Amino acid sequence: MRSRAVTRIVVLIAALVVGAPVACAGGERPTVASAPDTSVTAPSTTGGPAATTVPTTTTTTTTTAPPAVTLPPAPNGRGRPVAADDPVGLADQITRAERAIRDPATDPTTLPAWGHLQQVAYRKLGANPDWADAVLAATPADLQPVVQAHVTARSELAELHTALPGNVPAWEIQAPRPPEELLGYYREAEAASGIPWPYLAAINLVETAMGRIRGLSIAGAQGPMQFMPATWDAYGEGDVNEPRDAILAAGRYLDARGGPEDMDRALYGYNNSDHYVAAVQAYAGLIAADERAFLGFHHWEVHYRSELGDLWLPVGTRNEQPVPVADFLAANTWSAPPV
């Protein structure tokens, strides 16, 4: 694990998720800007994640897939959804995606499209923070705490990097393990370490988009939970790139750093940034409130916020070396941000 925040996804991520993954830490505190003044307070917990309050609703969900996208598809056949250009339209996209993801009756084959739409809509909101009040006003009351939690996570992660990169990293983008497999590993790690599994899922999301990002450099943090070699030697067993081994090691590390009794402290040990702590708390709280939120996160793609816009890196993308963003876009037109 490493102590300095680096450019991250997105989620997101992500990240993701804003740019590239954030490597886990265990050293000195990085220098970061103060968190923006917002009306959303990130949860602070001791023990399990603070669940976002989501009132029970009987609203009928549209379970068909979102409308087809107009951008050219990637080589794997997937298309990039386009976020609305106004707050009301964005609120409608978020509402439809959240309803579909949270409804057990939704056709599972449509969840990847709904998850991706959810992601690009929240990324658009993150890029236009002045829309937040209007989007919330146009969102059903029962989903407003969910949107607020996403606003918190994205604003906190945005503070981890301010300079937009000019290169696409040396990454391979691979398909994540199935959600039920990852959930089994999270629960196994919770049973062994006491760390509530939503935290492990949230870290997995923020670090590597559920394992989609695999760095091709032998230097630095490694694996789906991003361990530095010395930390892996202390807490890891098996293969750092194997999801089960990495997730179990993350549970052991968080336990050693103060969890589950003081998860703020444990998360700060994972990455020495209050912004990182607040973002992981927000995502973990969403999963704790409704386990199906994990399914939405599982289908978030890799988006990379660069100096030339928000790039989409689908499964199959592979750069052996860092590539200038302009060169990457020239070779991969489907990755270009919507105009």
Image (cartoon, grey):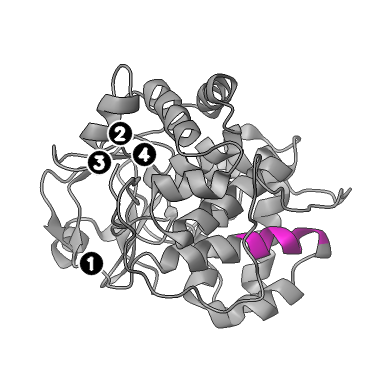
Q: Earlier in the sequence, mark 3 or mark 4?
A: 4
Name the residue located 50 percent from the left edge and 60 percent from the top edge: 120
Magenta stretch, main secondary structure class: helix
Which residue, as the protein is rendered here, is positioned at the far left?
321
Residue 140 showing in the rendered view: yes
Between residue 246 and residue 334, name the one nearer to us. Answer: 246
Tags 1 and 3 touching, CB below 8 Å: no
**How many angstroms separate mark 1 from mark 4 (CA)?**
20 Å
Q: Nearer the viewer, mark 2 or mark 3?
A: 3
Q: Earlier in the sequence, mark 2 or mark 1?
A: 1
In the picture of the structure, the residue carrying the numbered disc 3 is 221
Which percent across, then down, holds residue 144? Answer: 74, 64
Quadrant where the C terminus is found in the figure: bottom left
Name the secondary structure under disc 4.
loop
Q: Earlier in the sequence, mark 4 or mark 2?
A: 4
In the picture of the structure, the residue carrying the numbered disc 2 is 223
Q: Is residue 336 left or right of residue 266?
A: left
Residue 250 is a magenta residue: no
Name the residue located 49 percent from the left edge and 43 percent from the top edge: 266
Is disc 2 surrounded by few (<14), some (14 to 19) or many (20+) residues within 10 Å? many
Quadrant where the N terminus is found in the figure: top left
Name the secondary structure under disc 1.
loop
Relative to 16, is 256 above or below? Answer: above
Between residue 46 and residue 108, name the one nearer to us. Answer: 46
Name the secondary structure under disc 2.
loop
Relative to 214, is 239 above or below? Answer: above
Specify the amino acid type for callout 4: Arg
In the picture of the structure, the residue carrying the numbered disc 4 is 212
Magenta residues span 142-149
Name the residue located 75 percent from the left edge and 68 percent from the top edge: 139
Name the residue located 37 percent from the left edge and 64 percent from the top edge: 160
